[in-house]
Image (tube, helix red, strand yellow):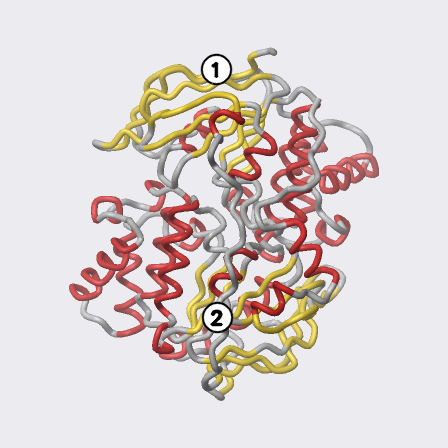
């Protein structure tokens, strides 16, 4: 067992708060070390130390040793490391150009890396820009980047966040294969099923400190895989609040327009929750963006309370903007990095509801507090938040607009189990008295089962199956639904081989 990289007695302090305090960590060749803990425990700050990156204004003490070669990084928010102005093929080919070979050989290495990262149809992805990819697809492109770099250490920050259960199996197998090649992997994760499957050692963090460490089997003893809860009993449907009719959406490419959604018809009643599930790249996020006015390249109609909504966000009135709110999977990209988060959350009520600034600030503090975000934390800029904390702040900001429809795109995927339950319970309360209707975009069928009244399963841009949540989960009819059901619910059946 060869030590490749290590951290000794690391302390990272920002202002008066030590976000990492006395942490030691070792990365060994061919071994996977998982770092777990609740949102804000210091996992990502610890992992980024191996890349020599720290929060702005941080005071750092301790030792960090890394190999002479590059350290690969797969971030929780993949869009943050993808150049939005360049196509995926160009981004990846730039890496292979340093390794020599002719154009065909470089292209072959890129396609192979994408296949290893479990990207279906790599050729089509190479022609797209990052914003034309789902969150799961972006994640796999970043993993391919790390593989192409040939790093001896890879820091994987929630690499299965936003992935469907079938793709998650592929990521598990790939990370295991990476370790089998002698690469050290530091896995930062909330997903205990993935940790249990992959990790040789587990380090548990809380409030910036290591509170437990040891072999995976002993540290996770007593942590049973999460089982699906019983699906909610559907209630009588009220008046329709949101509908689509014959919606067909496209992405523009160098070879013309590529169809990503075809003839989509879904409906959402007052106070109802519709879960959109399916594999990464199936069109879930594109559908959500069409509903919110963020993707205008579509034909067909989106109706709010029976009235057509303008396709473009810029063409919608202030009332229409407030009525349909979108909570992004990549919360970091949705905030201005230069302004305190509290100001940005409060501004939603000022801009869209005409609230007085003082009242908006008070409401923002109360809402953030319900999600466990204190006033002192809320006053920081986004860089001072963990990914899970920022995701909760993004939900709070959308709620201050007073929406009638809330579109939640994988908002529980980067959260620890306790916070995830808090968010799901809060969303369930929102729907009481038909206050808010939810479009819940998710790979998490367990969450869909407990929250949704109805589920629509997307496959290759079409509705493969739709119906009441209980019936669909208990008796799935379509092949893709059965595959997702079999692969999910906290059980990775196919064990990845370890070297």
Residue at mark 2? 273
Q: Going 64% across and 60% down the picture, which residue do you hit?
A: 278
Q: Position of residue 62 (x, y in %)?
A: 35, 16
Residue at mark 1? 65
Residue 243 falls left or right of residue 239: right
Q: Position of residue 264 (x, y in %)?
A: 65, 75
The image shows residue 225, relative to residue 63, as above or below, that is below
Q: Label 1 neighbourhood size at 10 Å, few (<14), some (14-19), many (20+)? A: some
Q: Quadrant of residue 93?
A: top right
Q: Going 58% across and 82% down the picture, which residue do you hit?
A: 301
Q: Secondary structure at mark 1?
A: strand
Q: Quadrant of residue 38?
A: top left
Q: Nearer the viewer, residue 355 or 209?
A: 209
Q: Quadrant of residue 25?
A: top left
Q: Going 38% across and 48% down the picture, which residue do you hit?
A: 419
The image shows residue 150, relative to residue 321, as above or below, that is above
The image shows residue 150, relative to residue 122, as above or below, that is above
**Distance from Cα at disc 2 to Cα at disc 1:** 49 Å
């Amino acid at each position: 067992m060869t030590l490749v990289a290590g951290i000794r007695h690391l302390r990272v302090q920002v202002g008066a708060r030590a976000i990492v305090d006395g942490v030691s960590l070792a990365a060994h060749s061919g071994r996977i070390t998982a770092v777990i803990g609740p949102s804000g425990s210091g996992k990502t700050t610890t992992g980024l130390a191996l890349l020599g990156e720290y929060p702005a204004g941080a005071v750092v003490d301790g030792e960090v040793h890394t190999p002479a070669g590059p350290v690969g990084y797969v971030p929780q928010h993949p869009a943050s490391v993808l150049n939005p102005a360049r196509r995926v093929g160009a981004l990846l080919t730039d890496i292979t150009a340093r390794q020599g070979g002719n154009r065909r050989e470089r292209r072959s290495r890129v396609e192979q890396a994408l296949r290893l990262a479990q990207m279906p149809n790599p050729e089509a992805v190479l022609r797209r820009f990052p914003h034309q990819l789902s969150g799961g697809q972006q994640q796999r492109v970043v993993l391919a980047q790390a593989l192409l770099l040939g790093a001896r250490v890879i820091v994987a920050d929630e690499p299965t966040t936003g992935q469907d259960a079938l793709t998650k199996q592929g990521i598990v197998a790939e990370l295991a294969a990476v370790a089998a090649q002698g690469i050290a992997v530091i896995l930062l994760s909330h997903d205990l099923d993935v940790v249990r499957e992959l990790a040789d050692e587990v380090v548990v963090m809380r409030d910036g400190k290591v509170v437990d460490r040891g072999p995976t089997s002993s540290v996770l003893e007593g942590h049973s895989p999460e089982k699906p809860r019983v699906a909610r009993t559907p209630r009588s449907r009220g008046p329709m609040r949101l509908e689509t009719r014959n919606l067909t959406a496209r992405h523009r490419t160098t070879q013309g327009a590529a169809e990503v959604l075809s003839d989509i018809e879904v409906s959402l009643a007052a106070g109802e929750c519709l879960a959109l599930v399916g594999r990464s790249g199936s069109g879930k996020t594109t559908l959500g963006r069409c509903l919110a006015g963020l993707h205008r390249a579509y034909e067909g109609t989106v109706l709010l309370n029976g009235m057509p909504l303008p396709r473009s966000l810029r063409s919608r009135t202030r009332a229409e903007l407030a009525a349909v709110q979108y909570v992004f999977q990549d919360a970091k990209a949705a905030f201005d990095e230069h302004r305190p988060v509290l100001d940005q959350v409060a501004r939603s009520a000022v801009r869209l509801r005409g609230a007085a600034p003082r009242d908006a600030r008070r409401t923002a503090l109360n809402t953030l507090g319900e999600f466990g975000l204190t006033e002192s934390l809320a006053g920081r800029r986004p860089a001072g938040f963990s990914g899970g904390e920022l995701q909760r702040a993004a939900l709070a900001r959308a709620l201050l607009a007073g929406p009638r429809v809330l579109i939640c795109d994988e908002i529980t995927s980067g959260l620890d189990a306790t916070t995830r339950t808090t968010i799901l319970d809060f969303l369930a309360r929102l729907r009481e008295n038909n206050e808010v209707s939810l479009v819940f975009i998710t790979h998490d069928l367990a969450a869909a089962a407990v929250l949704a009244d109805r589920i629509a399963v997307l496959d290759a841009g079409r509705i493969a199956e739709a119906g009441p949540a209980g019936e669909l989960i208990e008796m799935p009819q379509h092949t893709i639904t059965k595959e997702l059901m079999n692969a999910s619910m906290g059980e990775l059946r196919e064990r990845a081989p370890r070297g």
